[in-house]
Amino acid sequence: MGQTEDMKELIRREIQSIPNLAERVAYKDIMEGVFLALYEKNEEMYRNLETRVMDDLAYNINQYQIRTGIVEKRYLDLSHHLMTQVCREDVETVQCRIGELRKEIQETGKARLSTVFLQGDVLEIAQMIKAGRTYPGILRTEKGYNVSVRLEPGVRYLGKIERLYHLFMKNGVPWQTVNAPYLFKMMELMVLDIPEEAGDQEQVSGIGVDFGEHSHMVHYDMVPVWNVWHMELESIGFPIACGDHENYEHVISIRDYGVEHAYLVEEKAGIQSIRQNGDRLLITGKVANARKWDICMIRHGEDYRIDRYTYPVMENLRKDGFAERFQKKNGQKVKTKGELERFIRGFGMEPYVGYKDCRLEDGDGTEPETYSMNFFMNDEIRSRKGRRRLVLLFEAGQTESWLQRDIASFLVSEVQELYPEYQCEGKIV
């Protein structure tokens, strides 16, 4: 029997104990019309408060799912309902003159002209970049000029992932590794010299480079995309002062953008908490005035049948079941090989790589086949020196062989968060 029924039963017994009929009727009217109604209203308010607290505490492990892909520029749909470009400058038409490139080379020793995508295995690309090789190219204006070109990692794309990580931290959202292999294969095409006979006012129209035996790997005009959108939204109404007389609650309407999406707020000045309540974002902090807010929206939805992606779209999606939610809620550690296997298989990456086993090794060992997709997360407490190596063994799948070590790197990066006491690596056997 619930507390309300207990209270009703107590009132009924009290009514029966009153011998005078008129007094009994008066007491019943008072209890029915005032006390019991007040009690039920108070209980309803407590239930609403409990629901609000539980909603704030509830964490859907896939609510902040990130999708990444890459498309040819001519197929990029700027009106797409789900995906947008990682770097806005990739869709902007940039024109430059010889003089601008020459000045940049004089100041830094190189000048970025364009970006290319390398469709190749991790080890092959790493060896290619490590060699620091220069390639002959033709810089096209109305004429053609011989130049030297070098490839360098596209750090501006990787910087977007790092910025997203810090945004998660500001909003108090647990971080999950972004499965973004294409961003690690974007390379900047750097021009190292320009002939003196090239005039400063000549307009650059393009460049052609002979990459030799690597030519089959190099693709121009490729645009990385993901489901992370940037918006600027304004508070509605006036800020509501909190009980501590220091913080204020701001309300932002997201009705026009969709309550099914996840939202992060980018703000540096004293934000205490951010939560979503229906079609509103509630921001609590020391900002006293209504203002515009930088909002990061992680869009959810299904692809249309007419959508076209040059290569597979990658996700950091995990199966959302009882075991996963219980583990997240209670901070349960993965202690057995069976639990580790279940954790890895939860990402559903078997078409690319299948998990086989793991082993502990001492010493530095050979050069690892995988890399950290969480390269920006530094363990400032534990020293890497002397840590044992936890080597995860995978078997190659049947899909996209050139992406398999990247997918293994994503899985290893997730496992690394489970076992910070080890140096985690992956190997395809």
Image: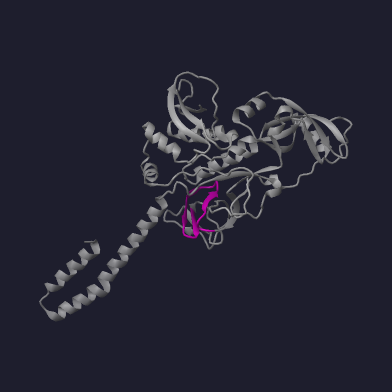
- Residue at 63% in and 35% down: 185
Q: Residue furthest bottom?
A: 22
Q: Main secondary structure of the magenta part?
A: strand
Q: Residue furthest front?
A: 398
Residue 333 occupies which quadrant of the picture? top left
- Residue 310 point in image, percent of width and height: 64, 44
- For residue 254, above or below residue 421: below
Pick the front one: 336 or 271: 336
- Residue at 70% in and 33% down: 216
Q: Residue furthest left?
A: 19
Image quadrant in which the N terminus is located: bottom left
Q: In the image, 326: left or right of 315?
A: left
- Residue 341 point in image, percent of width and height: 41, 35
Q: In the image, 196: left or right of 375?
A: right
- For residue 81, above or below residue 362: below
Kindly tell me whether residue 114 is visible in this rendering.
yes
Q: How is the image coloured?
A: one colour
- Residue at 44% in and 49% down: 60
Pick the front one: 54 or 209: 209
- Residue 163 point in image, percent of width and height: 57, 41
Magenta-colored span: 258-283
- Residue 174 point in image, percent of width and height: 46, 43
- For residue 324, above or below residue 393: below
- Residue at 60% in and 44% down: 69
Kindly tell me whether residue 420 is visible in this rendering.
no
Pick the front one: 424 or 380: 424
